[in-house]
């Protein structure tokens, strides 16, 4: 006798070929019924023999489409209806809208093969896609994911495309961006004066030719515009730097294949797996030693041991790389400090003074998404920036009590902003938004929140924000508080720690080592080199780096020579002015004397315990970098000179207990020894390596003292300093050798891009406790 089941499947099950997969699976098992997209996911009613039903249900999670993701399957018996066939029916709404949206997916091999086939009707068509690949998040305006709710609604399918779209056995069945040269989007190229130069295949050929000639080409991609030049052409790269006002910050590269990339960088198995994944992030890879016969432009990533490389992820990228240079600089297309341009007119207005030509297309980008950036550390991919290819995939979380998390929001910080919404067992982290110091970025922040709330159907019951009142994210939260929504201020480094706890499903109390550049402390000072003990509800500060003044306030973060002066003043007082070292000789004496006076009088010299500022100080003290043009530049240069040294020695330091129970990590002995090494003429690489080792030893010693006092043995590592591989790897190895259980980030960035998750978890803990 036939039986029937009602199955509700949640997860990433829309726009990924899930319904045609179920259709084919039902036919193979001789089952009948129907399936539909809903605002919750996919609803399925299936009928047939009991054994066939059981086999069908078992096959779903095992044989599902590669880019799909099942988070739950609710199955219940129902009465058979006597259906005669299996059907895919129209999408249905729901009283509550909740489905997971797929991120944008790189073009698949099957589509690439068709695009390269001269006999195929999509030969060299730059918008070829199917249910296994193509745009998703960046073209969606609402759920459920159907063509009328995407930017493809402006393109009516031709008869051939519609036949594919309606055929459940076709790879393009209900592929919402399905199109061809007859009915779909097109590319066209214009010069900097706006004059049309070509369209279709001719536009791509011309764009590739311009790149070969050393020109700058603006390219409209999946989540926004890139500015592209030939990566082997030094004059083109230098010109791009000059026109974009980006003197030193490394440029990202796009290589035609792993083979091409391997000519310039070392690639291990884990790195190759990241490079070739359907997410297609930029991956930081170690440069190979220069081969005179194989050279990229030296100014791509100056003073850096790594190159950031990605593989092509759209058909247009493949065509450009095939017809033009096989390695391109692909840097973000935007005005300095503004969000990525996604609109043709805005892009033309933003960088017509930079680009020689614009390779446009007429498919709208509804939602911008910068390229994600990752690095393999300790054999695991880690995010520096989580955006295109990953957002809006949720982070799976462990509810603090009961079965689900409350609906809360974390607003992020001021730099590398993201926002996070929670619901059930998920944390929905937005794509990278940027630094909230520009009115257009602030507008993008507002739009991101509205869009994320809409597609996740989450209206927060409580909102968490940073303690810093000057952040736009905090001001946004305060405005919502005026509307009656409960607010929670969360200390910056506590939020860092909680983000690491959350992605590792930790509860209870842990030791947290949080190292970064800046974060307002609960005492009003600037923290950044902290040892905490914490739970989701509260924290205690157990140790910190020695206070250093920041002469000139924010100027000290942009000019590391100020922090070097502060460090020397802390150890030697005004006598540092008489030190016989290169740093003193390179500095303007009157400026140093003025800074010494500021520090004596404590005028505009806020105190900081920041590890980031300590890196800046040492970098300048070694005459590596006195001023910076981008964030973390001095610290990155300091790491770069250390990487060539296999040094295990370190400098001396003290861990001094204080009356308030917070020990101080006193680096004065180390500074005195560093000055001694400088006077002795020891190489900067050796001194840098010893400094890195010393910083690791500082914090491990502090963690041991905290464990002795508290009995805690679990340690979480968070904060942007852990992007430094020497610190990250050294800290893990040293802590584990002392018997600690160490937890790190792999699902969200360790820097401020992950802090919204920690804020959200603090708010969830408060809401759970209060209700």
Image (tube, rainbow, N blue to C red):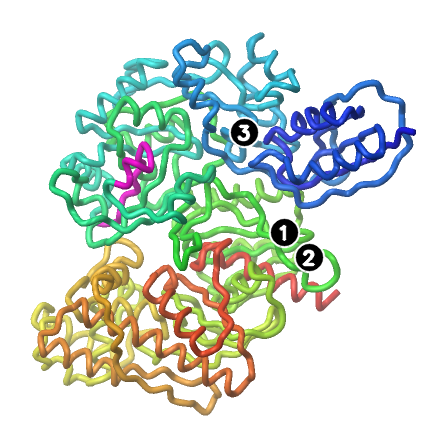
Query: For numbered disc 1, what is the local secondary structure?
Result: strand
Residue 170: x and y in percent read 60, 18
Q: Do callouts 2 and 1 mark residues in contact (Cβ within 8 Å)?
A: yes
Callout 1: few (<14), some (14-19), or many (20+) C-alpha neighbours within 10 Å?
many
Q: Which image quarter holds the C terminus?
A: bottom right
Residue under pointer 2? 405
Q: In the rendered structure, which segment of residues is drawn in magenta?
A: 248-262
Mark 2 vs mark 3: in front: 3
- Real-space Cα separation, disc 2 to disc 1, in angstroms: 8 Å
Give residue 723's quadrant in the image: bottom left
Is 266 in front, or is 583? 266
Q: Mark 2 or mark 1, which has the lower sequence index?
A: 2
Tell me if 681 is positioned left or right of 186 in this view.
Answer: left
Tell me if 307 is positioned left or right of 497 in this view.
Answer: left
Tell me if 16 is positioned left or right of 647 in this view.
Answer: right
In the image, residue 477 above or below residue 389: below
Is 48 in front, or is 417? 48
Mark 1 vs mark 3: in front: 3
Q: Mark 2 or mark 3, which has the lower sequence index?
A: 3
Residue under pointer 1? 426
Is 272 in front, or is 453? 272
Q: Mark 1 or mark 3, which has the lower sequence index?
A: 3
Residue under pointer 3? 132
- Real-space Cα separation, disc 2 to disc 3, in angstroms: 32 Å
In the image, residue 634 above or below residue 189: below
Residue 486: x and y in percent read 65, 60
Q: Is residue 252 magenta?
A: yes
Query: For numbered disc 2, what is the local secondary structure?
Result: loop
Which dot marks residue 542?
Answer: none
Give the residue drawn at x 17%, y 63%: 624
């Amino acid at each position: 006798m036939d039986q029937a089941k009602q199955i509700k499947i949640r997860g990433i099950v829309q726009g990924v070929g899930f319904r045609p997969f179920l259709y084919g699976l039902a036919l193979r098992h001789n089952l009948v019924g129907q399936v539909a997209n809903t605002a919750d996911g996919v609803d399925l009613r299936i009928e047939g023999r009991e054994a066939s039903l059981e086999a069908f249900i078992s096959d779903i999670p095992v044989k599902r489409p590669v880019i799909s993701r099942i988070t739950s399957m609710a199955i219940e018996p129902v009465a058979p209806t006597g259906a005669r066939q299996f059907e895919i029916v129209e999408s249905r709404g729901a009283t509550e809208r909740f489905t997971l949206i797929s991120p944008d997916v790189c073009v698949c091999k099957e589509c690439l093969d068709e695009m390269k086939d001269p006999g195929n009707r999509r030969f060299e068509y730059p918008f070829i896609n199917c249910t296994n690949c193509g745009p998703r998040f960046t073209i969606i305006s609402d759920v459920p994911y159907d063509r009328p709710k995407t930017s493809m609604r402006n393109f009516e399918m031709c008869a051939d495309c519609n036949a594919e779209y309606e055929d459940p056995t076709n790879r393009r069945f209900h592929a919402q961006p399905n199109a061809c040269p007859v009915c779909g989007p097109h590319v066209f190229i214009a010069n900097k004066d706006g004059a049309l130069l070509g369209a279709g295949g001719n536009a791509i050929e011309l764009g590739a030719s311009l790149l070969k000639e050393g020109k700058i080409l603006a390219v409209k991609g999946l989540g926004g515009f890139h500015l592209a030049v030939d990566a082997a052409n030094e004059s083109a790269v230098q010109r791009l730097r000059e026109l974009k006002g980006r003197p030193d910050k490394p440029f990202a590269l796009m290589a035609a294949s792993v083979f091409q990339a391997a000519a310039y960088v070392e690639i291990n198995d884990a790195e190759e797996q990241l490079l070739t994944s359907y997410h297609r992030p930029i991956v930081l890879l170690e440069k190979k030693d220069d081969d005179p016969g194989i050279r990229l432009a030296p100014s791509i990533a100056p003073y850096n041991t790594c190159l950031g490389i990605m593989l092509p992820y759209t058909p247009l990228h493949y065509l450009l790389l095939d017809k033009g240079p096989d390695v391109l600089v692909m840097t973000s297309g935007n005005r300095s400090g503004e969000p990525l341009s996604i609109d043709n007119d805005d892009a033309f207005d933003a960088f017509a003074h930079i680009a020689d030509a614009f390779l446009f297309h007429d498919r709208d980008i509804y939602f911008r998404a910068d390229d994600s950036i990752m690095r393999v550390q300790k054999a695991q991919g880690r995010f520096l920036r989580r955006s295109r290819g990953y957002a809006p995939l949720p982070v799976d979380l462990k509810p603090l009590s009961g079965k689900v998390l409350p609906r809360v929001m974390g607003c992020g910080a001021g730099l590398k902003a993201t926002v996070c919404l929670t619901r059930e067992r998920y944390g929905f982290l937005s794509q990278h938004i940027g630094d909230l110091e520009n009115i257009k970025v602030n507008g993008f922040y507002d739009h991101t929140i509205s869009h994320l709330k809409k597609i996740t159907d989450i209206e927060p019951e409580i909102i968490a924000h940073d303690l810093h009142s000057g952040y736009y994210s905090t001001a946004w939260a305060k405005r919502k508080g005026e509307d009656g929504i409960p607010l929670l201020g969360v200390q910056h480094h506590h939020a860092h720690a909680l983000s690491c706890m959350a992605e590792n499903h930790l509860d209870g109390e842990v030791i947290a080592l949080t190292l970064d550049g800046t974060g307002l402390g609960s005492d009003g000072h600037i923290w950044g080199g902290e040892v905490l003990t914490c739970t989701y509800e509260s924290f205690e500060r157990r140790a910190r780096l020695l206070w250093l003044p920041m002469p000139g306030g924010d100027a000290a973060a942009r000019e590391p020579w100020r922090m070097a002066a502060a460090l020397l003043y802390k150890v030697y007082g005004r006598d540092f002015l008489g030190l016989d070292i290169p740093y003193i000789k390179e500095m303007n004496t009157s400026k140093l004397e003025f800074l010494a006076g500021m520090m004596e009088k404590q005028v505009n010299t806020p105190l900081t315990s920041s590890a980031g500022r300590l890196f800046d100080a040492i970098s300048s003290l070694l005459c590596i970098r006195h001023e910076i043009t981008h964030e973390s530049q001095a610290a990155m240069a300091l790491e770069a000179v250390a990487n060539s040294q296999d040094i295990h020695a370190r400098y001396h330091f003290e861990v001094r207990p204080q009356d308030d129970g917070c020990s101080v990590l006193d680096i004065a002995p180390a500074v005195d020894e560093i000055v001694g090494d400088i006077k002795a003429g020891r190489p900067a690489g050796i001194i840098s390596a010893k400094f890195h080792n010393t910083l690791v030893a500082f914090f491990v010693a502090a963690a041991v003292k905290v464990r002795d006092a508290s009995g805690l043995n679990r340690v979480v590592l968070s904060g942007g300093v852990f992007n430094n591989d020497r610190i990250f790897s050294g800290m893990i190895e040293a802590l584990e050798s002392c018997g600690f259980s160490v937890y790190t980030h792999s699902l969200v960035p360790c820097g401020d891009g992950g802090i919204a998750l920690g804020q959200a978890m603090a708010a969830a803990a408060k809401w759970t406790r209060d209700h």
